[in-house]
Amino acid sequence: MVSLAKAYTVTFYGVLALMVAMGIWDVFFGYEENRCSMSYMFEYPEYQKINLPHKLTKQYPAYELYLYGERSYAQENKHLLLSGIPVLFLPGNAGSYKQVRSLGSIALRKAEDIDFKYHFDFFSINFNEELVALYGGSLKKQTKFVHECIKIILKLYEGQDFAPKSVAIVGHSMGGLVARALLTIKNFKPELVNLLVTQATPHTAPVLSLDSYLNDFYKTVNNYWLLNAQNIQLITLSIAGGFRDYQVRSGLSFLTTLSHQTKTLSVVSTAVPRTWASTDHLSIVWCKQLQLSTIRAFFDLIDDDTKQITMKPKKKMSVLNHHFVKNPAKLFEETPNIVADLTGTSKWVPVKVTKWTFMAFNESYAMYFAFPLSNHRKTYSHVFCQNSMLDRHSWIYGCINSVSMCTQGVDLSWKTELLPTMKTFMLKLQDFPKLSHVVVYVPSTNGNEFVVDCEFFQLELRTVHLPVTHLFSFGLTSRQIKLNSNGLFYTVPLLNFGQIYQAFKIDIKSKCASTKEKNNVFRLHIPWAHEDLMITSKAPTSTEVSLKLHVAQPENDSHAAVFHMFTSSECRYEITIRTSFLQILGQVIRFHGGALPAYILSSILLTYGGQLQSLTSVGHCLDYTIMLDKEAKPYKVDPFVIIMKFMLGYNWFKQIWDSFFLPELDAIFLNTQSMCFPLVSLVLFLFGTSIAYWGGILSSLSVRLLSSLWLTLKRPSEIPNDPRLITTRLSFLIMLLLIIGWTTCGALAILLIYLYYVFKIIKLYSNITTLKNNSDVIPNVSERNENNTNSSVGKKENNRSQKRLPPKPEILPLSLAIDNAEDNFKMHITIINLVIWVVLLSIPSLIYWLKNLRYYIRLNPDPCKYLSFFLVPTLGILGNSDIVSVKSSKLLKTAAQFPLIVAIGVVAFGSTHLYRVPYFVVIPLVLHMLSSI
């Protein structure tokens, strides 16, 4: 029965661990292939360092400012006699100032194409590749340095014709957040920045909140933008990378809830016209398609009068929408001329059929195909046309009150939408009652081949609703629809699809009348966010499409996600949808993976408390895995968090809560981010418990293996017989590490004391091995053991009276000595599993300190300084502690109760604010340490 229960436990946690691994795999590998082209430099890139004032270099010794150039342009600007439009690039977390080269090089080529009528000067800041996404202590410093650099850049243009008064900023990753933080500086003039473009920037919240400085910085910036949304005039474009960017999920890049929607635009790169590709966190700065769109937008933003970026907010938003939301396959015009002359020698051809196809090849003259609308208005609601010729000229017009042809028409090409393999046009006839004809213009082709298709249709007949499958169908069931009509366009609303935890696979099978390949375009359109997904395919074939969301549907939004199909009239289509369990696990990890350390530690804390209680109930410490399986139950934690969340909905309880200065419940924060979904806490707790289970087994095996290695190097003859809990050597070590933590880096002290603690446990297990190999008796581990026998005491007194010899260690039975030593080892293994997560959460600040050691010896501010003050002496003393003394302590019962309370606190307040977790963990460790004294 015992072996059967153990097999069940191993299987249960094995399945959970497999699910975690599947979710992680989906996040890191389950995305589309990289469809971005690499942007190359035509000449060797050069980075000219800008000399900064001595006061500034002394204040920011690690930071630098550069001007990007290539060959002749770099030589011309060697003396910094600049005459272009300044753009400042801000690298992000561990980013390089050299990442500006893609934008700078493309802009330079574009300027050459127009003979330098306009050109941009690209500056870039070297932030020493700081890890600001993991350590927030330098974000304020970076922001102030950027402010100084902007003033220095503008001074370079003083005295020049058309000297700029502001700069445009492109911020990658955390660089975009630093740019937004400029507005929070007390003396900052908002007019110094005329445009902000951010690439893969986590705007709404940090990816991982590993220290309070990072959290406070976010709170300061976002609160300022929320409170001043009406007054902030800065036009901001935020571009997210899509599912390939597993470092910053796209939902974090949306500025929808942080600012006025008329001044910000948030898009995913998969929805950007001419890009239509997901980018990873680094490729977003060199993706050729995306950088081309950005540079085109920059040149369209130039004001002909000032030779600088326009100051008109309306024009800025029009340009950004033109290049990043809906591109009509035409060059941007601020005031487009919608009246067009339809004159010349072009041939007019009337078309009276409802479906029409024209294949143009080597046409020697242009033609106008006129579609009369009067005969179709009563029967059909829409007219749709698609054109495989992707030029930027007008191609579709409307005639008003015309019989067969018109000399002037309305240019309807501005209603065109550019797609990957075609440009499409759809017109609702009811919206244009004065139009008598729709006219399609086909130019002379000069050898080019393209196809134009048009049809009239009733939208209701081309709309097929598809309810998505249930979350818990696990892909075993599916829903299917068939499109039997010969249409060019279909719209498939996906009913009940609006939550981030939903994920589906759509299989589209096409059967065509001929074997010749036809181009199809499928688009997932999300009405509440610019995160559309474009898929191109050839028919006849089978195409699989993954459906999942970056942003959940807002509660006040009733629009349905829609699957648009731009198809061939010669084909029939069959659509099958089923739930993708693998991608659901991926969504859980993508949106909540950062909370797993809190749930892991909650499980270990429950195990830790159970072991302390077992010392009073059964007299010895139970094994880690057995106790974890027994104690780590979600019903011990989740109900309390749910009750707190429910009670905080009442004002009187919220007032009491605030009177105790308690922080906001993390579950409430998740609600504001639309990230809470049913059973998520239960799922995360089970996932965390499985990781804690296998992590405990791994740590135990590692310690046993290292102890075996230690035994081969130095075999101890007996367990150390120093009875003191705090030795002189330990006191010296604790003082040394405290000094190190307070004068250099707290995380370094925590790491060193943890390594010391692990080394003590390795030696302890080596001694246990030695004990088992010894004969009848052995010196006791501690002279503080109260289970002394009267006979041994008597013998000692006799020996002392007869001979004045030093006291000898007590003699215990071998089995009792081994039991005590193994109990110590079991308890220490749990502490090792507990503290390793504290070390991991503090490692980022240590890495930051090591990287900047040549500039600063002391990390300031240090998020781990106060933590090291408590953890160093606690771990040092616990390394010498003994189970016997703990069992006899009056504090044991109190110490055994605290891990449960702390486990609840870790989940309630540390799941999204990870920097709080180590302070929770220290509480039961300190009580355990006090029980040892």
Image (spheres, rainbow, N blue to C red):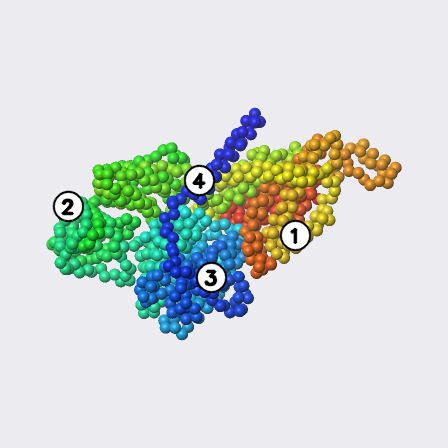
716 or 2: which is nearer to us?
Answer: 716
Judge depth for marks 3 and 1 and give the one in front: 3
Q: Position of residue 34 (x, y in %)?
A: 38, 47
- Looking at the rendered structure, which numbered label has been put on residue 737? 1
- Looking at the rendered structure, which numbered label has been put on residue 585? 4
Q: Quadrant of the N terminus?
A: top right
Instruction: Tell me the amino acid under the disc marked 1.
Output: Leu
Q: Secondary structure at mark 2?
A: loop
- Looking at the rendered structure, which numbered label has been put on residue 800? none
- Looking at the rendered structure, which numbered label has been put on residue 125? 3
- Residue lying furthest right in this view? 802
Q: Residues within 10 Å of mark 1 (few under 14, many from 20)?
A: many
Q: Secondary structure at mark 4?
A: helix
Q: CA distance from mark 1 to mark 4?
A: 42 Å
Instruction: Tell me the amino acid under the disc marked 2.
Output: Val
- Residue lying furthest top in this view? 1
Q: Position of residue 918 (x, y in %)?
A: 58, 48
Asked if marks 2 and 3 touch (Cβ < 8 Å), the reply is: no
Q: Residues within 10 Å of mark 4 (few under 14, many from 20)?
A: many
31 or 40: which is nearer to us?
Answer: 40
Give the mark nearest the N terminus, 2 or 3.
3
Q: Position of residue 348 (x, y in %)?
A: 13, 54
